[in-house]
Image (tube, rainbow, N blue to C red):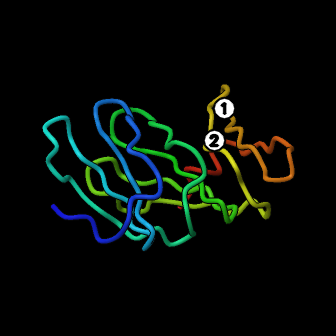
Amino acid sequence: WPLSGRCVWGPQAVRDRVMMATDDEQLYCLDSNQTLLWNINLPYGPLAGTPLPVGDDEYILASSGGVVWRVKADSGEELAKTETGYPLSTGPVRMGNQLLVGGSDGCLHTIELANAQQP
């Protein structure tokens, strides 16, 4: 499985998978045997931080452009998104029913987890 561009993010371990992104805004997800499970376009720009696993079947991702979105772990299919209105510099961290993301302005921003899960 050749990469479509130069690796600019990762590889990062996310539970039992490895993710990496390329300079042509593609995100790749591999299993522990280095088998390509899926690759998707990063529609909201480069990733900010590491994706957050939610349960066994979803990830929450954040883009440097300020979008936080949820995808299926088995396919990368987008399930929902939230636009923060702020450029982001970190991936999401779960605290109870909220997600914390670090803004490029040095501030922490909160998102209700339920909002990140709405279509």
Residue 19, horizontal then vertical, whole percent: 36, 47
Q: Mark 2 points at which residue?
A: 113
Residue type for callout 2: Leu
Q: Name the residue under label 1.
A: 97
Q: In which quarter of the image is the N terminus?
A: bottom left
Q: Are marks 1 and 2 in contact (CB under 8 Å)?
A: yes
In the image as oriented, which residue stretches furthest toward the top?
Answer: 96
Between the C-alphas of marks 1 and 2, the distance is 5 Å
Q: Which of 25 and 16 is in front in this view?
A: 25
Secondary element at tag 2: helix
* Residue at x-position 55% and y-position 63%: 46
N-terminal label among 1 and 2: 1
Establish if 56 lies above or below 4.
Answer: above
| Direction from residue 105 to residue 7 in the image, left or right | left
Mark 2 nearby-residue class (10 Å; few <14, some 14–19, many ≥20) = some
Residue 15, horizontal then vertical, whole percent: 35, 30
Establish if 52 lies above or below 1.
Answer: above
Establish if 26 lies above or below 93.
Answer: below
Residue 84, horizontal then vertical, whole percent: 74, 59
* Residue at x-position 26% and y-position 64%: 3
Residue 43, horizontal then vertical, whole percent: 50, 72
| Direction from residue 21 to residue 107 in the image, left or right | right
Residue type for callout 1: Asn
Image quadrant where residue 26 sits: bottom left
* Residue at x-position 29% and y-position 62%: 39
| Direction from residue 12 to residue 85 in the image, left or right | right
Secondary element at tag 1: loop
Q: Nearer the viewer, residue 84 or 118?
A: 84
Image quadrant where residue 13 sits: top left
